Image: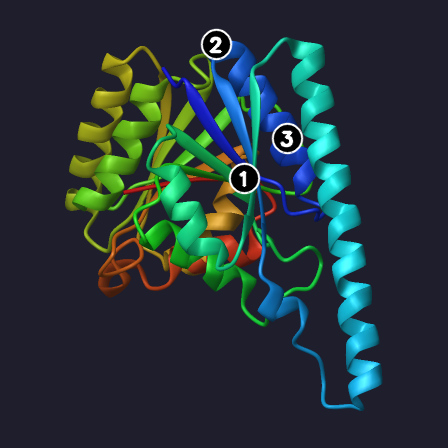
Amino acid sequence: MIKRILVGLGGTPFTPVAIRRAVMLARSQGAEITGVTIVDPRKLGRVAPTSSDEADSVARGRRRVTEEQIEHATAMLEAECRTSGITCRLHREVGDPFSSMVALARYHDIVIVGLRSIFEHDLLCPDPEDQLLKLVMSGVRPVIAVSTEFRSINRVLIAYSGTMESAKAMKRFVQLRLWPDARLKIMTFNPSLADADRLVADARDYCRAHGFTVDWETNPGEPSALLLASAALWQADMIAMGNSLRSVFMRRVLGDTALDAIRRSPVPLFLCS
């Protein structure tokens, strides 16, 4: 069970879904929500080479838009929490978004952010997906990275390699029981059919012991090419994946599967290590 939820209010298309997901989880778990906005003045003031007057004008415009987006997002969260009777706190941070997020995450049970845009306020950096990856690899866990479309979580695909990282992600998802009625599908990618069958059987039995209905599938193909297609074919509402500080879902075995999922997944991800 979770009691404290941290949600990033980025003023992006992902923000309304992040808020709705946080409110629904808080309602079902009896939890409280902390909404956090983080503004990096250096990023807002970074403009293309031009005259000083033009640069100041652009920077002022960015600050104004950012402030408007933040106010809209915080008002939305407060209204949703008030309607649902949920305790809500707001943190307005200035500076590096990741150090602030990591510090706040220490005292929360789960973090909810946008899948491809966290605190950019529509001023996207060249690699927003890598920034989410950096957040997860810094030890913030578990993270729910939401897509721009809200959906009920009825079917969850668990990408499982047999590594400790993927096992931790599977166990954390199952133990939290955020969606206890969801149907799970264990999917592993292994060139050895015997090894794959053994991995799937062990993972399936673990999830069943926790009361979940479980499907399973093994595939000898490349996960970076097949994971999202398999999730779409099974009509998954969420993908649960592992990660580690040294590698993402064991790059040596599975390549950049997690990063590829962050970049291209149309469904939310549950990321944990």
Residue at 64%, 47% (x, y): give it.
10
Mark 2: amino acid: Gly
* Secondary structure state at the residue bearing disc 1: loop
Q: Residue at x 63, y 8 (%)?
A: 85
* Towards the viewer: 156 or 193: 156
Tell me the element at label 3. Answer: helix
Cβ atoms at labels 2 and 3 below 8 Å apart: no
In the figure, 55 relative to 176: above or below? below
> In the rendered view, does 150 fall on the left or right side of 158?
right
- Whole-percent x, y for residue 232 in the image: 56, 42
Residue 271 x %, y %:
39, 42
State whether residue 26 appears in this view: yes
The quarter of the picture where the N terminus appears is: top left
Describe the element under mark 2 as helix, strand or loop.
loop
- The mark that comes first in sequence, 1 or 2, is 2
Q: Nearer the viewer, residue 266 or 203?
A: 266
N-terminal of the pair, mark 1 or mark 3, is 3
Q: Is residue 66 above or below residue 106?
A: below
Q: Earlier in the sequence, mark 2 or mark 3?
A: 3
- Residue 135 percent location from the top left of the image: 40, 53
Q: Answer yes or no: is residue 162 visible.
A: no
User: Of the residues shown, which amino acid type is indicated by label 1?
Assistant: Pro
Task: Identify the residue at horizontal 80%, vertical 56% (top origin).
Answer: 65
**What residue is pinned by disc 2?**
30
C-alpha separation, residue under disc 1 versus residue under disc 3: 14 Å
- At label 2, counting other C-alpha atoms closer than 10 Å, the crowd grade (few under 14, some 14-19, many 20 or more) is some
Q: Quadrant of the C terminus?
A: top left
Q: Residue 19, labelled with which disc?
A: 3
Mark 1 surroundings within 10 Å by alpha-carbon count, few (fewer than 14), some (14 through 19), many (20 or more): many
Residue designated by label 1: 268
Q: Is residue 174 left or right of residue 34?
A: left
- Residue 3 located left or right of residue 112: left
